Every structure is written in C-alpha cells, then in structure tokens.
Image (cartoon, helix red, strand yellow):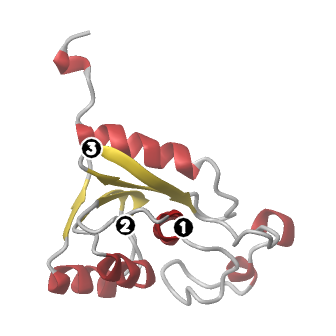
Amino acid sequence: MSDRDRPSWDRYFMEMARVAATRSTCLRRQVGAAIVKDKRLLTTGYNGAPQGIRHCSETGCLRQAANIPSGERHELCRGTHAEQNAIVQAAFHGVEIEGATLYCTHQPCSVCTKMIINAGIRRIVFENGYPDQLAVDMLEEAGIVYEQLR
C-alpha cells in the first residue's frame, strides 16, 4: 500500500466518528463524534439518551411527535448529542481535551458549541451541515477553526 492509498488524518478520524454514530438510538439523525489530540483518539460519543434512561427507540421521539423542525427546541429531546457525550466521557475519565480537535458527522448545534468552547477544543471537522447560525457565529467569535470535510 502506498502513502497515496492511506486516508488523511482528517478522513481517518472522521471514519471513527462515523463508526460511533452507528451506536446512536436517535430516530431522526445518527450522529457520531471523536475527540483527538496529537493524532491520538481520546474519546468518542454518539447521540442517545443518558445512561439508565430509556432510549427514543423504545419511547418514541418527543420532537417528532410535536412536529419540531430540525435545529429548533433542543431542550425537548431525551437524547444527549454526540459532541456532549464525547466531552462528558473525557470529564468522566479525567482526559485532558484542551486544544483538541473534534470530528463530528454533523456540524455542532449552538448548545454543543457552547460546551465545545468551554472545553477548550480548538478545531472542529464535520461532514454534514446543520441549520444553526448562532453556532457558527459563536465559533467565529471564539476563534475556533471549523471546516467541512468534503
């Protein structure tokens, strides 16, 4: 195998975020995240209910039942976002993520963006867009690099 056949680091770690997304129990969108520092995978996360709480796959989707559009009323959901779960896993296990890169299958929402800023993550690489201009505005104001992997 030549170096030309190897994936870039961004593609490599994005694939790990995609694998994490396969654990999602969300009925609307499967999202995965991976936090990386110095080319080392630190934590992963996927969207789903907090531990010990029934998943939306068991209870049904509150947002869908209420016809809430994507990108609105994040608080009306049983699930925790993939980015939040990856950050919480780092805190739970005492893993330093300041200065890290977050790989995510979807652009973070404004709620996750606030956590990302406060966690000291300095770069975000995502695949799919998400309709949340406030998140973009906050990332730019905080000086966090964010880029869509194509």
* Residue type of the residue flagged with mark 2: Gln
* SS category of the residue bearing label 3: loop
**On screen, 88 above or below 12?**
below
* SS category of the residue bearing label 1: helix
Label 3 packing within 10 angstroms: few (<14), some (14-19), many (20+): few
Residue at image coords 33%, 37%: 12
Count of numbered tags = 3
Label 1 packing within 10 angstroms: few (<14), some (14-19), many (20+): many
Residue 31 visible in the shown view: no
Image x and y of residue 71, in percent: 48, 80
**On screen, 37 above or below 93?**
above
Label 2 packing within 10 angstroms: few (<14), some (14-19), many (20+): many
Residue at image coords 54%, 71%: 81
Residue 34 visible in the shown view: yes
* Residue type of the residue flagged with mark 3: Lys
Q: Which mark is residue 107?
A: 2
Disc 1 or 2, which lies upstream in sequence?
1
Q: CA distance from mark 1 to mark 3?
A: 20 Å
Q: Which mark is residue 85?
A: 1
Q: CA distance from mark 1 to mark 2?
A: 15 Å
What residue is shown with label 3? 39
- Of badges 1 and 3, nearer the viewer stands 3
* Residue type of the residue flagged with mark 1: Asn
Q: Quadrant of the N terminus?
A: top left
